[in-house]
Amino acid sequence: ATSLIRVSSMCLNLRKMDQVLDLHQEDFDVTVEPGVTPKGLNSYLRDTGLWFPVDPGADASLCGMAATSASGTNAVRYGTMRGNVLNLEVVLADGTVLHTAGKGRRPRKTSAGYNLTNLFVGSEGTLGIITKATLRLFGIPESMVSAVCSFPSVQSAVDSTVQILQAGVPIARIEFLDDVMINACNRFNNLSYAVTPTLFLEFHGSSKSMEEQVSITEEITWDNGGSDFAWSEDEETRGRLWKARHDAWYAALALRPGCKAYSTDVCVPISRLPQIIVETKEDLIRNNITGPIAGHVGDGNFHCLIVLDPNDPDEVQRVHSFTERLARRALAMDGTCTGEHGIGLGKRALLREEVGLLAIEVMQGLKATLDPKNLMNPGKVL
Amino acid sequence: MLPLRFRRVTMSARVLVGVKRVIDYAVKIRVKPDRTGVVTDGVKHSMNPFCEIAVEEAVKLKEKKLVKEVVAVSCGPQQVQETIRTALAMGADRGIHVEVSGKDYETLGPLQVSKIFAALAKKEQADLIILGKQAIDDDCNQTGQMTAALLDWPQGTFASEVTLEADKLKVVREIDGGLETIKIKLPAVVTADLRLNTPRYATLPNIMKAKKKKIVNVKPADLGVDVSSRLEVLKVDEPPQRQSGVKVETVHDLVEKLKEAGRI
């Protein structure tokens, strides 16, 4: 969300503050400093049976993930940072140190006063610098099973998603890849999935519940015309499956060597997903844009991994217009212009359209109160 | 139809797995100011990563029904019980805590540990001992080999693959030149190398179940082992600080500098 720095700014690197503090196993909470990442934290926790499941794909700073309200492939089951931060230590623009829920406090729920913790989550560094985060932990599931299923159409894949959720299957990951994306993955990773809309799924739970979850899901996909439903509990096979998904970015880049990639990010209510993906694909084809689609359909969130030649001004312009249309399409469907990636510089105008003038004024008021001199990541978000 | 001898050896086979409590691999090690050792107080400890791989391999053998019982063993003070509990949560059936503390623990090394394991192997009638190839604190890489020698058992060290074939163990070993495949008779000692497997995480339900599994306390003297050390650590120092490099302007300068340093 924050990729452009103005000439007169300074960047702070907090990487050396890298301690895991205050683990409370029975309470399922832990406090971390900015230098700790999900991989580092989960390695620290490995003997406790606990883990922090929010997984944005990159091994990022957990406090940074709080600042950007990061999400990931298993948000459908475990939520995003918004639901999993219990307390923050924030250094404000005037140098004072704020504990958003009170120093050292970590109840699982509270209704004490204004929710300052969630004010800072997603504020993209514009309201203060996060120096500690108290996070909610989860039990490592006894069993994990991954599955793949091919579908004749986008509609059938998304319909299956909706029905799986409605059936109450506590699905952990449900990822959608369109035919262009699957083709790219096949070529990049030497796989041979059918080149058609595909769902990658993952189930977490006790060994006993796995069979039930998988069989309910398989039936639903079958009813929607799905085929080649394949599942595996074996760790190596699962790893290869998810590698294909996590390599999507590189697989997309490999479609046009020498080009750059740009990812879009919108999120709509799940029932509107088939329509927006179909319309978006038509838009891509009409404008001759290479844009494989991968998405967290369980959240109604998807990304077009657009591959473009940055030296071709016409293509750059076409892509830019496309992304604006896409964002407005999502807004028109009661959605958001950014499900995960944040506002930064590029989506400030869209934020205004999304929340409306009054909400922007309230946000500006909060910003003015907490950072009257506009020192904190100036120019971003608002 | 399996030969009677195979059935007797494998279906009732008991595996001993050694697990060592070490400073966690992610911790930045600091040398004590008196240079007698490294700082261990308040520092995160966990199971030696190669021991995790050893436990995983033993548990896998049990899941394949090729062995009957996995016994986790650790030598040290009260805290090593945490390490044994982790092994139990990964699937070991019971634990043995060999109590060594104080000065004896500070000087405990591969020779004493291998004597302890040899004694336990006889006492428990073990058919297979699986250890990590080395511990990440001392990097000795000796305990497996010494244990096999004391028992006069064959050894398959640096194992990256272990297969049970009738009453023999096929072990693929990682060696400098590549991979070496050997067949050794049971009972035997195997030491686990990095690529042998990926250890499972202990899940909460399994950690809860592990609390009910038994850990028995044993003293080295009960096993007839003298833990006094014949080695004395004289001093411990940090590795020398890395010197910064020097940038030069031209190729000529580079050649001059290399000549100065006696490199060319």
Image (tube, rainbow, N blue to C red):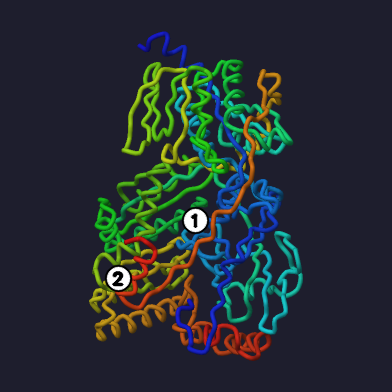
Residue at 58% in and 34% down: B19
Q: Is residue A165 left or right of residue B214?
A: left
Q: Chain of mark 1?
A: A
Q: What is the quadrant of residue B125 in the picture?
A: top right
Q: Are marks 2 and 1 on the same chain?
A: yes
The residue where tag 1 is placed is A166
Residue identifier under label 2: A291
Judged left or right of residue A318, residue A75 is: right
Query: A143 or A247: nearer the eye?
Result: A247
Residue at (35, 48) in percent of width and height: A222
- Disc 1, SS: helix
Q: Secondary structure at mark 2?
A: loop
Q: CA distance from mark 2 to mark 1?
A: 30 Å
Q: Amino acid at mark 1?
A: Gln
Tell me the residue at 62%/47% (across/down).
B236
Q: Identify residue type, mark 2.
A: Gly
**Residue A166, image x, y percentages:** 49, 56
User: Residue B95: x, y in percent?
Assistant: 63, 28
Residue B3 is marked as none
Density class for disc 1 (Cα within 10 Å; few <14, some 14-19, many ≥20) is: few
Between disc 2 and disc 1, the foreground one is 2
